[in-house]
Image (spheres, rainbow, N blue to C red):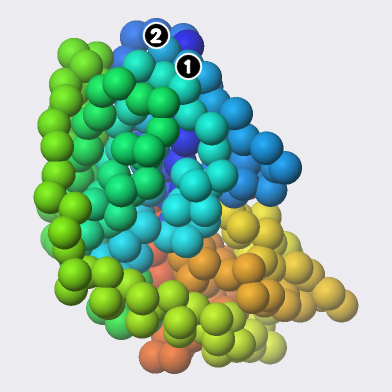
Amino acid sequence: MTRIFYFSGTGNTLWSARTIAERINTQYELVNIGGEVEKDEINIEADAVILLFPAYAYGPPLIVSNFLRKARIKTPYFAAFVTYGTSPGGALAAVSRIVRKKEIEMFYFGRIPAVENYIAIFGPPKAKTAEKRLRWQTESTEEAARSITERKTNSLNTFRPFSSFVFSLFSIALKIFYKWYKVTKTCDGCGICEKVCPVSAVTIKNGKPYFSKKCEHCQGCMNWCPKRAILFVRLGPKTPRYHHPEINVEEMSR
C-alpha cells in the first residue's frame, strides 16, 4: 500500500497527487492532510509514503510541518514533492529536516512547477503563461511518478537561511491575514468557500463567510468563489481568479 498525503488550496497540488496515484500502478490511498492533522494521533505505516504540498513564502504551509511533526511514520520509502509558482525556496529543506528524524530508510525530494496562484501579489496568470506552466506541471508530475516507481533517492542541502527568514516573517503575518478578507454584497451564501477550505477556517454564519485564525492563507476561498465576492488587499471583484482547470469543487471538498 502506498499512502499519498497532500495539501491543496486551488487544486494544483491535488491534481499532481491524483495523477501520481493513477500512474504508480499499485494500491494507494489518497489523503487530505487537512483532515488528518486534527487527529489525536497520526500513525502512518506503508510500503511507501508520498507527500505533496505547495510552497508558501519559500516554506511549507504550517499545517504540513505540524502534520509531519505529529505523525509517526514507518516506511522504507518516503518521497516529498513541492508544487510552486515563483520559487520553491527552502520548502523541501524544511520538510527534510523534520522527516529525517522518522523511521524511514530511503528519501526522495522533487519539485513540480505549477501556475502561480497567489494572485493577491502576482496578479492573475496570463493565458499563455498558465498554459506553459500547466504543461510543465504535467511533465514534472509524470517524472515524479516514475521516480517513485523506480524508488529513486537523493539528498538536499538543508541550510537555507534566507528562505527560513522569509518564511518566519510570513508565519508572523499569517496570524492577522485572516482579518484582511472582505466579503462583498454579491455573496449569496452558497458555502463553496467553506467546502473547499482545507483547514476548516471558513464558516458560513447568517449567509456570509467568516474567517478564523486557523487560516493558512491558501486563498482557495477567493479563487473558488463563483461570485468573486471574497476580496483580499489588491484583489477586486473584477480580478480574474484561478484554480486548476481539471479539479472541481467536489474533489476539493473531500
Extreme residue in the front direction: 101
Q: Find residue 26 and name its label.
A: 2
The residue located at (49%, 71%) in the rendering is 217
How many numbered marks are there?
A: 2
Quadrant location of the C terminus in the rendered image: top right
Crowding near pointer 2: few (<14 within 10 Å), some, many (20+)?
Answer: few
Q: Residue furthest top?
A: 26
Nearest to the eye among marks 1 and 2: give it: 1
- Image side of residue 96 versus residue 157, left or right: right
**What residue occupies the far right of the structure in this picture?**
206
Say the numbered circle drawn on residue 110.
none
- Above or below, 55 against 177 in this view is above
Look at the image and tell me whether residue 109 can be seen.
yes
Q: Mark 1 points at which residue?
A: 46
Residue 148: give x, y in percent of width and height: 25, 21
Residue drawn at (43%, 60%), measured in percent from left and top? 61
Q: In this view, does 146 lie to the left or right of 176?
A: left
Q: Residue at 67% of width from left, 55% of height from top?
A: 195
Please report the residue visible at 68 percent of the width from the left and 59 percent of the height from the top: 200
